[in-house]
Amino acid sequence: PERGVHRGRLAPGGGKGIAAVGPAPAGLAASTVPAQRGHSVEMIDADDASGGQFNLARRIPGKEEFDETIRYFTRQLELTGVTQRLGQAVTAQSLIAEAHDEVILATGVTPRTPAIEGIDHPKVVTYADVITGKVEVGARVAIVGAGGIGFDIGEFLTHETSPTLDLAAWQKEWGVGDPSETPRGPLKGEDSPSPGTVHLLQA
């Protein structure tokens, strides 16, 4: 639109009508901050819940604090009056037709599928399907990729419960003792037995 001409929904006080596409932390911040400044914000995404990849990360043993980020932004959405349109995919054409003053794209990434032989085998599954419980894996698992997500999946598959939520279990795993009882330093850590065998592979 021409400068100074408003084509979208005018917010109280003269703010802009803004669409923020993406429900992950970037999209949540891009929604709540403009709303705090008086703009009318609509957060849109094809997912049916806000949080994005954080909804996967918070299920990894040791990363339960990601829950707090989602909890914080969920409350901020309520306090700032952001409208949520979840479970609805949009296109460039539909966003243009809705005549928003500004559109913020914060859609994150789409995991790539490597072009390797056997990638279409029924035993090959995605990390998202494993974490969400959509599929169950067997007792012997090969993880292709030794980056951050590969390590997270390894933690997920080798822990039946999270020691992070159990102080005694966490201290035992990491060898942390009471300073008054162990003045000479840390104890020897004790790993909990893995429910299966996991191989982490990297080219």
Image (tube, rainbow, N blue to C red):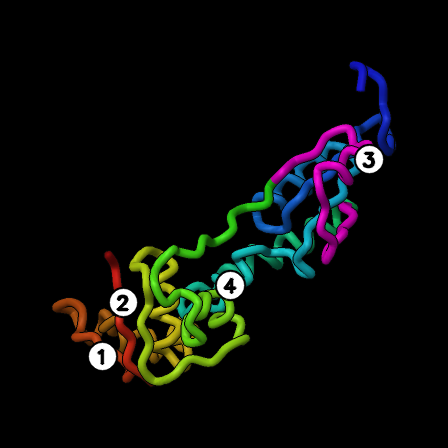
Query: Is the Cβ of the residue at disc 2 closer than 8 Å to that at disc 3?
Result: no
Residue holding disc 2? 200
Q: Quadrant of the C terminus?
A: bottom left
Instruction: Give how far apart the Cα atoms at labels 4 and 1 are.
Output: 27 Å
Towards the viewer: 128 or 193 = 128
Query: Is the Cβ of the residue at disc 1 closer than 8 Å to that at disc 3?
Result: no
Q: Specify the amino acid type for callout 3.
A: Ala
Mark toward the viewer: 4 or 1:
4
* Element at label 2: strand
- Label 2 vs 1, first from the N-terminus: 1
* Element at label 3: helix
Query: Is the Cβ of the residue at disc 4 closer than 8 Å to that at disc 3?
Result: no
Q: Residue at x 51, y 63 (%)?
A: 56
Give the residues drawn in magenta, as a range: 82-105
Mark toward the viewer: 4 or 2:
2
- Label 4 vs 3, first from the N-terminus: 4
Q: Specify the amino acid type for callout 2.
A: Leu
Towards the viewer: 117 or 130 = 117
Query: Is the Cβ of the residue at disc 2 closer than 8 Å to that at disc 1?
Result: no
Q: In the image, which disc is placed on residue 190? A: 1
- Label 4 vs 2, first from the N-terminus: 4
- Label 1 vs 3, first from the N-terminus: 3
Mark toward the viewer: 1 or 3:
3
Query: Residue placed farthest to the left in the image?
Result: 184
Where is residue 25 shown, x and y percent of the image? 57, 48
- Say above or below: 83 vs 92: below
In the rendered structure, the answer to whether residue 30 lies left or right of residue 68 reads right
Residue holding disc 4? 56
Q: In the image, which disc is placed on residue 97? A: 3
Q: Specify the amino acid type for callout 4.
A: Leu
